[in-house]
Amino acid sequence: MNAPAYIGRFAPTPSGYLHFGSLVAALASYLDARAAGGRWLLRMEDLDPPREVPGAQDAILSTLDSYGLQWDGELVRQSQRHAEYQALVERLLQQGLAYACTCSRKQLEGCHGIYPGTCRDAGHSPQNAAIRLRVPNLSYAFSDRVQGEYRQHLGREVGDFVIRRRDGFYAYQLAVVLDDAWQGMTDVVRGADLLDSTPRQLYLQELLGLAQPRYLHVPLIIQPDGHKLGKAYRSPPLPTDRAAPLLVRALHALGQEPPGELERARPPELLAWAVRHWDVGRIPRCRTLAEAQLR
Ligand code: GLU
Ligand code: ZN
């Protein structure tokens, strides 16, 4: 069987409801997949039960539904994939590619988020410890379809990073790489807040012998007060009764130029227009975009 030419996804975290910034990312990945005649999958990244907002999963699904963003196939939940993540963590530990870290948050203060390698050769037991992946002292680069060349030195700018937390939950970086490969993603379209996660993901792909998808990072929408519309910021759910105007607004954020009358169209009709006219070349080549600057 031939591998499909395009498989993309939207991968929300239920630590909050979908907000305008997530709509922009969801819409971009949907349009890119549909314009390529590809599949568009939905994966719930419910890796962090302590931070999950009750009801957020259902709210996300019904928002996508009322905005006409129909996904293909079965919804995948990362909470159902622990056995796979655990097997990988064990393998990496056995191969000496990962190690247990017992550093407290306090001990890591002043490291500016770059792990100094304290526990690299300590030989701690993995019980009750975080597991970190050793990174090579190399820089990883890729060519983003919108943002262009992006490069990061894993040793100097990131350090050995956590793949399983001390509380036993798995880290986003590990799960996203494993699942994107398992689901056969050819394309990752997401918000530019994840640009600086991509080199870690490239390293994991290389380590595991997985294919590298193409990447497209769309601008992150920020609020007038500088708040990024993201996980940390509890924004209200998107209204379900104003889908068309908000989709039009999201299209503007993506540099597309929908005719004004589409605001009165039904989401399916609006999305059909947007698929036909999808032009990646018009997406603003910036990392953030102020919501207030949008029409
Ligand atoms: N779950 C991540 C988020 O909501 C996105 C993961 C991804 O697209 O790679 O920020
Ligand atoms: Zn440590």
Image (cartoon, rainbow, N blue to C red):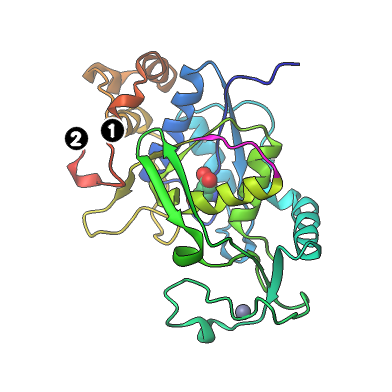
Disc 1 packing (10 Å; few <14; some 14–19; many ≥20) = many
- Dot 2 alpha-carbon crowd within 10 angstroms: few under 14, some 14 to 19, many 20 or more: few
Identified at 44% across, 18% down, the residue is 268
Q: Position of residue 94 (x, y in %)?
A: 81, 64
The residue sitting at 20% across, 46% down in the picture is: 292
Task: Write down the quadrant of residue 190 in the picture.
Answer: top left
Q: Is residue 103 left or right of residue 143?
A: right
Location of residue 104 by image quarter: bottom right
Which secondary structure lies at badge 2?
loop
Residue 212 on the magenta segment: yes
- Magenta stretch prevailing secondary structure: loop
**Residue farthest front in this picture:** 137
Tell me how far mark 2 sits from mark 1, CA to CA: 7 Å
Locate residue 142 relative to residue 246 in the image: left or right.
Answer: right
Q: Which residues are magenta?
A: 209-214
Residue 220 within the magenta-colored segment of the rendering? no
Residue at the disc numbered 1: 249
Question: Which of the pair 270/252 is nearer the observer?
Answer: 252
Instruction: Give the residue furthest to the bottom.
Output: 107
Residue 160 at x, y = what percent?
Answer: 58, 67
Q: Quadrant of the N terminus?
A: top right
| Sequence order check, earlier mark of 2 and 1 | 1
The image position of residue 161, as x and y in percent, is: 58, 65
Cβ atoms under marks 2 and 1 closer than 8 Å: yes
Label for residue 295?
2
Instruction: State which quarter of the image contains the C terminus.
Output: top left
